[in-house]
Amino acid sequence: MNPVLEVKNLGIDFGGLTAVNNLDMEIYPNEIVGLIGPNGAGKTTVFNMLTKVYNPTRGQMYLDGTDIEKMNTVEVNKAGVARTFQNIRLFSKLSVIDNVKVGMNNHFEYSLFDMIFHTRKRNENERLIEEKALDLLKIFNLHELKDVEASALPYGAQRRLEIARALATNPKVLLLDEPAAGMNPQETEDLMNTIRFVRDQFNIAILLIEHDMSLVMNICERIYVLNYGTLLAKGSPDDIKNDEKVVKAYLGD
Amino acid sequence: MTFLTYLISGLALGSVYAIIALGYTMVYGIAKMLNFAHGDIIMAGGYVAFYAFSKFGLPSYLCIILSIAVSTIIGVIIERLAYKPLRQASSLSVLITAIGVSYFLQNAAQLMFGSDTKIFPAMLTEGSLKMFNGQLTISYLTIITIVTCIIIMVGLTAFINKTKIGKAMRACAEDKGAAQLMGINVDTTISVTFAIGSGLAAIAAVLLCSTYPSLSPTLGSMPGIKAFTAAVFGGIGSIPGALLGGMLLGVIENLTKAYISTQLSDAIVFTVLIIVLLIKPTGLLGKKENVKV
């Protein structure tokens, strides 16, 4: 089977500092993969390169065999990479459902003419958008709050809405940056089920950064460990748990 | 009755300010820049309407459409050529560029149309409505101006809240980075914002020049500054704020002229602005920006 996301020899320098170096990674369809490592290991930097927020200094990135290295952020998103953020970046003044609809902007085309004259095409599209947005919100149990301003949601709900918004862009690969940060154990448990459900329902691959080891070991099928910007280890959760180098990196000598 | 007359003409003047202020406030809200060349788009729109009507004898509705079209194109071109390359630059560089663009437009107009003042034709309407046995006279132009402003406000609010592009604009206003990651083309969104602002400036131009029928290359600067003031007064970035700020500014200006002093009217208007900003620094309807940690 071909990987849906493949990076080869990926690296980025900030001035003289090499933040990520020599990273090889493959994500296969329908996989849940963890990206872990101590603070400052370069995990979020990898996400920023995958979404072209940063331009990698070296290396190649392929999505479904297509080179995404030369694309810009918008094109990468259209090609099928979506993400959430470590510190929530919702459109806080938009309603819950509008946040999701913004994510769908690209997938429903109608012209200015359609918009002004409310043609059948526009109405049909708007109906589809509304329907799809509601379906998404139901998955995350947010549909009853659909008209609430996003900033008024409780913290856990905001995290879930970010995932819903990312899914609205119809990705092939979903990047989750610390989805369980700040959640209590019950919320984390629910989140794990939701992540699994999303993977099965939408048939997508998920790459997630997380510090909550119980979550990572529980739902990830494979794990990549970064330390000082380089790949320290990769393998199944059991391999990683028993890897000496990983234990050392986390706990020190 | 005279008070009512002054009040109504103040509302008409305020409507023009509000329409111009929309351009400032939308561009500020989305591109986070002060487009000081906005006033000169009004001037451009005025000249287009003038030449289309006086020299080519086009019917007035065509003149207005043409004026809107040309202003929109000028606005988008300015954004692409002058502001887009500075997207990552400091806001001070963008501000100075905007002032440069403003002078460029004024001088280009002087070169093309001459610096003499032209008399703007009455292309919209003449005559007035008399009420209460002729005690209250309201010109049709005043009514058209106020009604146009209300239609624009309602239309724009619906556009911003209901349409796809409107939602993209609100998303960009909050967080351009996140918007891009959700597949929204920020450049296109900013272009649309400039297009709308410039088109509205052309409408304001026709209304303004019809009320004060003299046309010169520096026509846009004073209304531009007043409208900018109105935008700040109401809370920059806020569309209802632009309406409220514009209306209040127009009414205050007109009533001061009528009852206190014509010479001092601008001074009094700006004093009111300063007092409002001292009490409420974000403007009347402006919200405090949340600082991200």
Image (cartoon, coloured by chain):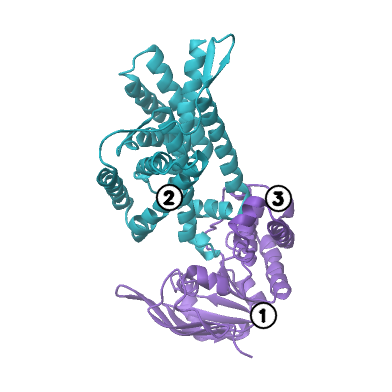
Q: Amino acid at mark 2?
A: Val
Q: Chain of mark 2?
A: B
Res. A236 mark: none
Q: Amino acid at mark 3?
A: Leu
- Local crowd size for mark 3, using a 10 Å CA cut-off: few (<14), some (14–19), many (≥20): some
Residue B144, horizontal then vertical, whole percent: 54, 30
Residue B220, horizontal then vertical, whole percent: 35, 37
Are discs 3 and 2 both within one chain? no
Q: Chain of mark 1?
A: A
Shade representing chain A: purple
**Secondary structure category for the residue under label 1:** loop
Kindly tell me whether residue A63 is visible in this rendering.
yes
Q: Which residue is mark 2?
A: B70
Quarter of the image where one finds residue A156: bottom right
Quarter of the image where one finds residue A216: bottom right
Q: In this orientation, which residue lies closer to the viewer: B219 or A216?
A: B219
Q: In this orientation, which residue lies closer to the viewer: B182 or B17?
A: B17
Q: Which residue is mark 1?
A: A30
Q: Amino acid at mark 1?
A: Asn
- Contact? badges 3 and 2 (CB < 8 Å): no
Q: In this orientation, which residue lies closer to the viewer: A185 or A252?
A: A185
- Local crowd size for mark 2, using a 10 Å CA cut-off: few (<14), some (14–19), many (≥20): some
Kindly tell me whether residue A22 is visible in this rendering.
no
Please tell me which residue is depicted at 47% across the width and 43% down the height of the picture. Answer: B58
Quote the CA–CA distance across marks 2 and 1: 52 Å
Quarter of the image where one finds residue A2: bottom right
Shade representing chain B: cyan
Q: Mark 3 or mark 2, which is nearer to you? A: 2
Q: Which residue is mark 3?
A: A145
